[in-house]
Amino acid sequence: APSRSSERDRGDRPGSGQGREASSQGAHTQQQPAGGGAVPLWPESARLCMLSCVTPVLMRRVQQILSGFIRDDTQSGQCPLPRHRLDEVAFVFSELRRLDLPPEVYSSLASSSIEGGGGGSGGEREAGAKRAPVTLPVGGPGGDVGSLSGSERAELARTLAGRKCHLMVLLPQLSECIGSKDPHVRRELQRLFSELSKSLGLC
């Protein structure tokens, strides 16, 4: 019969069940930070990089949904659209209103091909990503906002909106949804515009 010491030796070997359990517990303990809090699954830099890649794709999809809704709602005349279509748009408005984007993600919206469906060539988008932020001109010859180009005014509007810059990107489509015949859609849209007004400091 094996001795107690040999059983203990087998339990301490890395291949044994007890050894694996001890190693697992040790590794888990090493992952705990000194403060005792949870270990973040994503570093902040990786999270921002992921958001910068995903957000333009999300905005293009939202534009497709809203453009299709505007077209179908106009063509339907006095007939209401199916309930699931109305609920979809109302849900999109609600989620857009609650969405906050970190300032670091702003450049992904400014340099992506969201607006107008094209947004220029890759070189133009790269130049837009490297361009210095537009500041509001004050005083001096030509120091009014009218001296800015169209793209500079759009960039300034997104900058002023802060964490709600995605609403400025979608503003053309959102404005066209005002004429919706459904009261629930109009109510969600009103709440969305109210949130945008707060982010701009207008109320």
Image (spheres, rainbow, N blue to C red):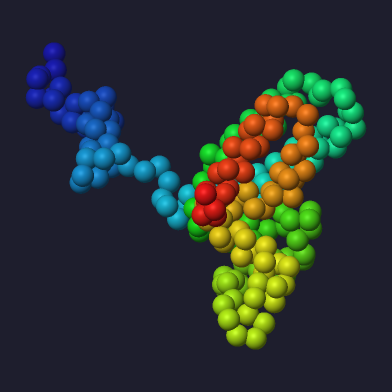
Judged from this view, the residue extending furthest toward the front is 203
Place of residue 123 in the rendered image (x, y in percent of width and height, measured from the top left):
72, 70
Residue plotted at (90% across, 28% down): 77
Say how many tags the image has. 0
Residue plotted at (79% across, 21% down): 82
- Please tell me which residue lies in front, 141 or 2: 141
Q: Note whether residue 14 is visible.
A: no
- Please tell me which residue lies in front, 189 or 57: 189
Place of residue 143 in the rendered image (x, y in percent of width and height, measured from the top left):
63, 80
Image: 10 above or below 52: above
| Quadrant of the image containing the N terminus | top left
Residue plotted at (64% across, 53% down): 168
Place of residue 17 in the rendered image (x, y in percent of width and height, measured from the top left):
26, 24
Residue plotted at (60% across, 40% down): 192
Image: 126 above or below 7: below
Q: Note whether residue 38 is visible.
A: yes
Image position of 69 (left or right of 111): right
Image position of 21 (left or right of 51): left
Place of residue 46 in the rendered image (x, y in percent of width and height, measured from the top left):
47, 52
Image: 197 above or below 158: above
